[in-house]
Image (cartoon, rainbow, N blue to C red):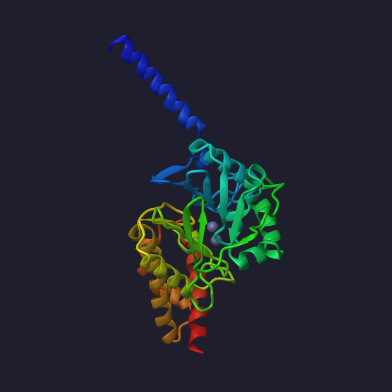
């Protein structure tokens, strides 16, 4: 090795170490930065656990489209502090301003970071579904602020509600800086899927679908009172039918429809089928659990399987029962 190559290699090594040090460091949870998925699309894939002190409440997948004159951001994270980190990490990809934010649904891990974006870019446009805007400004928004504070052991203190002000209407195409964003609200008659506030945002130019929590990868999620598993299956069917190139789930790795949408849809469909069978045989939900758990062996490694599986059966049971009458 000549002295020159040694010198160049040393410099490269230092640069590499600096780049790693520059990523957002959450200690034992990991380091996080926006990764280029394709073209103008970058995603910072959050950790898959639940909000905690260790992860500062960060767990979702903030995604950006880098346009000519600015950035369009989907779901800036779970607290004021996390939102600030998201803004910092975006600045490492591009120095352009953040022009607009889409919030996919009411769950606080996706939108409480709005506050930091609005603070850094006061002219930013904030979009959400009408029901999301209403709930964010009401009791639901306030309870997410206190839940985050509890789960992060007070780390999220100072987080304030900055709700979207602009309505993202079902099937609307919103143009921002020459980029087109098509809004897909839940297709089920009930208007429900993961919640009754969901939008999936299709970026037309890059053929990307930001799915919010209508889809998870290698992870289970809660189905709360505003959700509908049957409606979630319909939303996933719609997502697949769009035939896009890139799918960004609310939690877990981005990829193709086959990698991202198909596994969660298969899980929900199997749940639907098995619980319906059990219901027809007049079994109770706890009896069904025992009878079907083996059929779900391939999902056991999904984050949160143990804590969610029984709840999913109970939720599906209620839905199947309601549909009977
Ligand atoms: Zn959610
Ligand atoms: Zn979420």
Image: 139 above or below 13 = below
Residue 72 in the figure: left or right of residue 35:
right
Q: Position of residue 75 (x, y in %)?
A: 55, 53
The total number of labels drawn is: 0
Query: Closer to the camera, 142 or 268?
Result: 142
Residue 158 in the figure: left or right of residue 183:
right
Query: Closer to the camera, 51 or 210?
Result: 210
Q: Position of residue 12 (x, y in %)?
A: 39, 22
- Residue found at the very far front of the displayed protein: 178
Q: Position of residue 23 (x, y in %)?
A: 50, 35
Residue 232 in the figure: left or right of residue 257:
right
Res 26 seen here? no
Image: 321 above or below 244 = below
Image: 270 above or below 13 = below
User: Looking at the rendering, which quadrant does residue 246 occupy?
Assistant: bottom left
- Residue found at the very far top of the displayed protein: 3
Image: 82 above or below 313 = above
Q: Position of residue 305 (x, y in %)?
A: 46, 61
Residue 149 in the figure: left or right of residue 179:
right
Q: Residue at x 41, y 65 (%)?
A: 239
- Residue found at the very far bottom of the displayed protein: 325
Q: Residue at x 49, y 78 (%)?
A: 317
Quadrant location of ligand 1? Answer: bottom right
Q: Residue at x 50, y 30 (%)?
A: 21
Query: Closer to the camera, 221 or 206?
Result: 206
Image quadrant where one finds the N terminus: top left
Res 271 seen here? yes
């Amino acid at each position: 090795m000549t002295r020159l190559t040694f010198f160049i290699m040393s410099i490269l090594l230092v640069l590499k170490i600096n780049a790693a040090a520059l990523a957002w460091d959450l200690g034992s949870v990991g380091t996080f930065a926006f990764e280029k998925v394709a073209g103008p699309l970058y995603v910072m894939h959050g950790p898959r656990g639940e909000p905690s002190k260790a992860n500062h409440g960060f767990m979702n997948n903030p995604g950006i489209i880098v346009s000519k004159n600015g950035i369009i951001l989907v779901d800036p994270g779970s607290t004021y502090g996390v939102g600030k980190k998201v803004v910092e990490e975006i600045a490492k990809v591009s120095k352009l301003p953040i022009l607009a934010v889409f919030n996919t649904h009411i769950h606080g891990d996706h939108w409480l970071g709005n506050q930091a974006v609005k603070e850094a870019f006061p002219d930013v446009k904030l979009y959400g579904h009408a029901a999301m805007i209403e709930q964010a400004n009401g009791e639901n928004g306030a309870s997410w602020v206190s839940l985050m504070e509890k789960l992060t052991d007070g780390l999220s203190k100072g987080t304030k509600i900055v709700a979207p002000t602009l309505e993202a209407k079902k099937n609307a195409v919103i143009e921002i800086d020459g980029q087109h964003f098509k809004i897909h609200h839940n297709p089920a008659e009930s208007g429900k899927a993961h919640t009754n506030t969901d939008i999936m945002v299709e970026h037309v130019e890059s053929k990307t679908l930001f799915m919010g929590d209508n889809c998870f990868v290698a992870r289970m999620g809660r189905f709360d009172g505003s959700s509908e598993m049957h409606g979630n299956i319909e939303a996933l069917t719609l997502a697949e039918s769009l035939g896009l190139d890139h799918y960004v789930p609310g939690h877990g790795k981005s990829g193709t429809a086959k990698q991202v949408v198909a596994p969660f849809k298969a899980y929900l469909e199997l749940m639907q089928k098995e619980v319906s069978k059990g219901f027809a045989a007049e079994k109770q939900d706890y009896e069904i659990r025992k009878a079907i758990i083996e059929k779900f062996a391939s999902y056991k490694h999904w984050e949160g399987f143990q804590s969610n599986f029984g709840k999913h059966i109970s939720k599906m049971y209620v839905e199947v029962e309601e549909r009977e009458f």
